[in-house]
Image: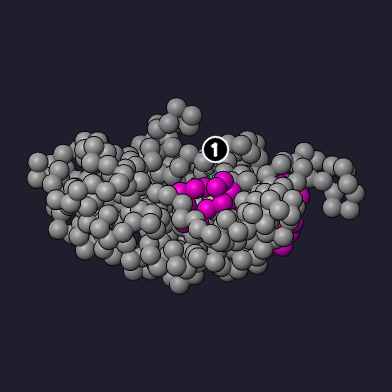
Amino acid sequence: MKTLRRNIPVAEPDLDSREREKVLDCVESGWISSIGTYVTQFEESFSHFCGAQYGIACSNGTVALHLALLSLKVGPGDEVICPTLSFVATANAIRHTGATPVFVDSEAFTWNMDPEKMAAKISSKTKAIVVVHLYGHSADLNPILELAQKKGLPLIEDAAEAHGALYRGKKVGGIGTLGCFSFYGNKVITTGEGGMVVTQDSHLAERMRLLRDHAMDSKRRYWHTEIGYNYRLTNLQAAVGVAQMEKIEKFLQIRRENAKIYKLLLREVSGLTLFPEATWATPVYWMVSVLVEEAFGISRDSLMEKLKEKGIDTRPFFIPTHMLPSHREEGPYPVSESLSKKGMNLPSSTRLTQEDIEYVVQTIQEIREG
Ligand SMILES: Cc1ncc(COP(=O)(O)O)c(C=O)c1O
């Protein structure tokens, strides 16, 4: 067994001299708040990367979702469909508008919202659908889009975990009415904290720009006809984003290569179900995920604990939102609940070496063998 060289984090930002140069440029020029050329550059490069015409940068992925929902006039009395198996931000953003999240169970293969179960949740109060591309693998969008179109409902893609992932050859986030991204420090690209909504719809884009900036009239300074928000991204953060965009293709390539190595090695470990790869999807492996099945011999939680002792950081799957005190609802949502109990994310950053991955898998194998 190899000796431990370092603690292996589950995720870490990949920054270098390019980010340093651009941040320094902001410091030296004094353009550190939300006015500045990097914000526009970042909006343009990221929205074009997604195949969308407009990008509205904002403070984080949660407010990206909030802005998206507000632009669609979602509010009190409305219902919004979303998967229960997601980070809590998805449902929180819906609640922030005054609307009610209506949860849908996952389907067992991709772990994303089950389109068949979704159909039964649509009511006369449904105002929008939010689909999540969990852990970097796209949801099966066609049946969801078909249903959305049939019912005349807009589709928001919560692509916070899936920058660059493809669904049938198209970039996620650019497929639905609106696509929302997070640039938190553990994401595929980061700005520290940050978010963006992308869209092809100029009216929605304009609406979100207004709401992002206190709803101040663009022609009359300090004139506000409604209550807006300060959801702006800073030029400093956008500078980091612009530098990250120069490297996004390289990051995605590294993630694909790392996933390939993991897959090859993890196949030899019995009792684990590996991350999904649907024929119609090109995942970005934001997280390298596995399900710890009963056949593995020890529980997911003990495996995580033992890995921690060996310097390997992991994360459990999200707890389905309907099980949280903040959003409690009976359910049951059996597929999401079972995935949540068994699922864990292994170290997944672009900075992993082949040796790190070998060490992780070898340690898992040794723990299994006791
Ligand atoms: C699926 C999903 N949606 C939304 C968010 C919210 O993004 P942020 O943390 O930037 O607010 C996250 C976050 O990390 C996420 O995983």
Classed neighbour count for the residue bearing mark 1: other residues with Cα under 10 Å, few (<14), some (14–19), many (≥20) = many
Q: Position of residue 97 (x, y in %)?
A: 63, 39
Is residue 173 visible to us here? no
Is residue 28 covered in magenta? no
Q: Quadrant of the C terminus?
A: top left
- Front in this rendered view, residue 141 or 119: 141
Residue 307 quadrant: top left
- Front in this rendered view, residue 131 or 208: 208
Using residue 45 as the reference point, say whether residue 370 is left or right of it. Answer: left
Using residue 270 as the reference point, say whether residue 357 is left or right of it. Answer: right
Q: Position of residue 85 (x, y in %)?
A: 40, 44
- Front in this rendered view, residue 367 or 95: 367
**Residue shown at the point (30%, 56%) measured from the top left:** 275
Above or below residue 116? Residue 341 is above
Q: What kind of residue is marked 1?
A: Asn
- Front in this rendered view, residue 61 or 359: 359
Q: Which residue is under mark 1?
A: 92
**Residue shown at the point (43%, 35%) measured from the top left:** 322
**Magenta stretch?**
184-212
